[in-house]
Amino acid sequence: MLPQKQSTVSSASLDNATHRRHLEQMNRQLGSASEPARLFFAPGRVNLFGAHLDHNGGPVMPTAIHRGTLIAARPRSDQRIRMASTLGGEVLDGDLTDLPTVAGGSWFDYPLGVLIELLKGGSSTPQGLDLFFGGDLPIGAGLSSSASICVGTALALDECWGLGIGREGWVKAALQGERGFVGVQCGIMDPHAVGFAKPGHLLWLDCKDGSFTHLPLDPDAVSIVVMDTGVKRKLAAGAFNQRVQECRAAAKFLMPLSPGAECLRDVSEEVLAEHGARMDPVLQRRARHVIGEVQRTFQARDFLIQGDLAGAGALMVESHESLRLDFEVSVPELDLLVDAIAKGGESFGGRLTGAGFGGCVVALVRRGQEEALRERAQGWFVERFGRDPGFAVFLGDEGPRELPLP
């Protein structure tokens, strides 16, 4: 049993009372209708191993979490599309035959990009929809709220329009919508982690060829804890895309020196050691993180298969140091929480998760020791920064699905 204080285990998005409030708020913001709405859910994800490897062709090990995006979809009698959110803000109200061609910087750019992707190649314009978004996944915290909303949108449109594209289609549309319309040069990990979730397992995904399998993670032995620094990020604003471009530049320099290399993931430590001094120092550091992280991720997989959680956890701490020093995506708040994780006996290890620049840390914690970690980490954080970090124990999730109406 988890300690009694761990109320964070529950998920509002999967609660009938929340579903009723979601539908009621949809009616208030978009008006009531005779046609009944349908409810859909897509989880968020947390990545434990393989930081910043997805856009470098490397292996990653994320898992879906039981919080995510809640979408109510209601058919219309015309060809209009309306999108609104429980968070308020702008409302999209447009015609399916005359949609924006460029992103405007609004929250609905993400579901709109997916919608535009699914309309490509269609022989006719489908029926209009009202879409209302909510959920309990924090935005900008490194838990892949963007992939959650994109995969969830693809699921809702697939079901409402009878497209028959399935999970592979949801993942593809989510990825293309975020890359092509929103302009975030993300890798394939996030939509795959959301779309192909399996409870009690990590997804082993090879981002070079898209192959994947599932690795068990015993929920009776380990909890996945996420602590939120409260430092928000804006991935599309430049820092993430800058790292992508730096990695591409490093790969362009190193791949000709590595026979058969197709991406930065394929470059060996020996090649970097021999030729790295001739690179721009920034690019050398970026390459050092990626190449070392590839090795750590394969090692972590071996440890997990052997049941060696301590070995895998130690690699998470090493990963964070590389992200801090070589990839330069950490902030003091993240560093303090990882230090708190590493200094106690409750955890196997932890690191920042997501793109960095703020957001969250993830830890593998001994089952039943969550509260001890919370007390130390929050105490240190309050003393240094004057506020509580968020603290959540996450369960796995079965992936995107339609929910029964309350």
Image (spheres, helix red, strand yellow):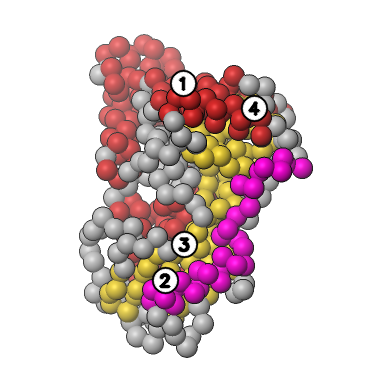
> Please, what is the three-letter code of the amino acid marked with disc 1?
Glu
Q: Residue at x 60, y 52 (%)?
A: 66
N-terminal label among 1 and 2: 2
Q: 36 or 376, which is in the foreground?
A: 376
Task: Indicate whether 225 appears above or below 161.
Answer: above
Numbered mark located on residue 321 in the image:
1
Q: Residues within 10 Å of mark 1 (few under 14, many from 20)?
A: some
Name the quarter where the N terminus is drawn: top right
> Please, what is the three-letter code of the amino acid marked with disc 3?
Gly
Q: Residue at x 60, y 67 (%)?
A: 17
Q: 71 or 200, which is in the foreground?
A: 71
Q: Are marks 4 and 2 in contact (CB under 8 Å)?
A: no
Name the chief secondary structure element in magenta: helix
> Please, what is the three-letter code of the amino acid marked with disc 4?
Ser
Numbered mark located on residue 134 in the image:
3
Q: Position of residue 174 (x, y in %)?
A: 42, 57
Q: CA distance from mark 3 to mark 4?
A: 32 Å
N-terminal label among 3 and 1: 3
Q: Which residues are magenta?
A: 1-30
The residue to which callout 2 is attached is: 131
Q: Tell which tag, 1 or 4, sits nearer the viewer.
A: 4
Left or right? Give the position of 225 relative to 336: right
Task: Indicate whether 72 appears above or below 292.
Answer: below
Numbered mark located on residue 347 in the image:
4
**Residue 77 visible, this orientation:** yes
Q: 65 or 301, which is in the foreground?
A: 65
